[in-house]
Structures are given as structure tokens and as C-alpha cells.
Image: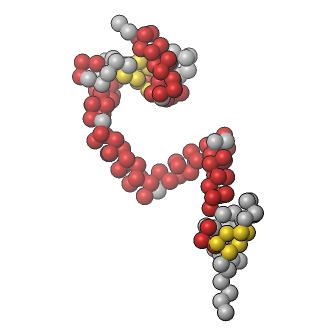
Amino acid sequence: MSDQIISKRCYKCKQVKPTSEFSKESSRKDGSQTACKRCKSMYHKEYRVTDKGKQKHREGSKKYQKTKKGKQTCNKAMKKWDDLNPSKVKAKNAVNYAVQIGKIPHISTQICKCGNQANHWHHHKSYEPECRLDVVPVCRVCHRKIHSNNHCVLHHEIHAAFAN
């Protein structure tokens, strides 16, 4: 007779499930976690939307990006993005060069429309060669809002404020 456990009760949902429904945990006597995969997944989804969960995720991501595997993954993702967005890359490079030669001031000397310190140059017209230096200073928060589909009003306000 085998000592292998074939099912166990999830402490969250209280249902008896096969051990295959539980993730492994070598520190436990039976070798599996106390909550089933579904309950654990729901817990993590709820936790990730809390401030503490977001902070922990950011910390974990930064830590992972410093590892050899994390650097390779990030480099692959950046290369893929660059390959898919050549006009954006050229526009970004044009702005960086213009800052280097003094044609555009450094972003650290600029203030966003919301009053916060600017961190990014936003290409508010297009990425085409004739518009590559048509940029406005924006903070991280406003830049994210501009590019999100939910804040097209802010996007139009920025365009209207800097239209020639």
C-alpha cells in the first residue's frame, strides 16, 4: 500500500480536491501548498491591486531585471519593440541628439503642464521626420495618461495647448 496522498482539502474554499490541484511546497509534510491553485490565483489577483501588492511587484520586477535571465528577457523585449516601432526609435534618438547638442533643453529643467517635474518628452504631433523635434515636456503620470485609451481628453488638451 502506498503512503501517497491523492486528495486534500483546500483551506480557503474548503473543497476536497486532487493533489494535482495544489502547487508544490517542499517544506510541507505532504509536499503541496494548503490552498488550491485556483484560490491562490484569486488571492494573488486581489493582492496585486492593493498598494502593497503593486509595490512588492515593482520591487520583484526590479530585482528580476538585475539577474542575468532578467537582463536577457528585457533586452529581447526592447529589441522586439524597437523592431516593431522604427519611427518611434528614430524620433527618440533625434530628441536625444538634439538635447546633446543643446537644440532642446534637458528634460530635468522642464515642468509638466500639471506642475510636476517633467521626466519625458512627448511627441505630440507624430513621429515623422518633419515632426521629430515637436515635443512637449510631461511627467510620468501625464505621459501614461496621454497614451492610455481612457484619457483621450487629456491627450487632446496637450495637443491643443502646444498646437502652433
Q: Is residue 60 above or below residue 141?
A: below
Name the one closer to the observer, 19 or 47: 19
Query: x, y percentage for residue 145?
Result: 51, 26
Name the one closer to the observer, 105 or 51: 51
The outermost residue toward the bottom is 1
Query: x, y percentage for residue 149?
Result: 47, 27
Q: Is residue 47 above or below residue 114?
A: below
Name the one closer to the observer, 107 or 38: 38
- Asked which colour scheme the image uses, the reply is secondary structure
The outermost residue toward the top is 164
* Residue 33 visible in the shown view: yes
| Residue at 40%, 49% in the rendered image | 74
Q: How many marks?
A: 0
- Quadrant holding the N terminus: bottom right
Query: x, y percentage for residue 67?
Result: 47, 56
| Residue at 65%, 75% in the rendered image | 31
- Quadrant holding the C terminus: top left
Query: x, y percentage for residue 122?
Result: 40, 23
When asked about the image quadrant of residue 24, the answer is bottom right
* Residue 25 visible in the shown view: no
| Residue at 28%, 41% in the rendered image | 83
29 left or right, relative to 89: right
| Residue at 56%, 51% in the rendered image | 60
144 left or right, relative to 81: right
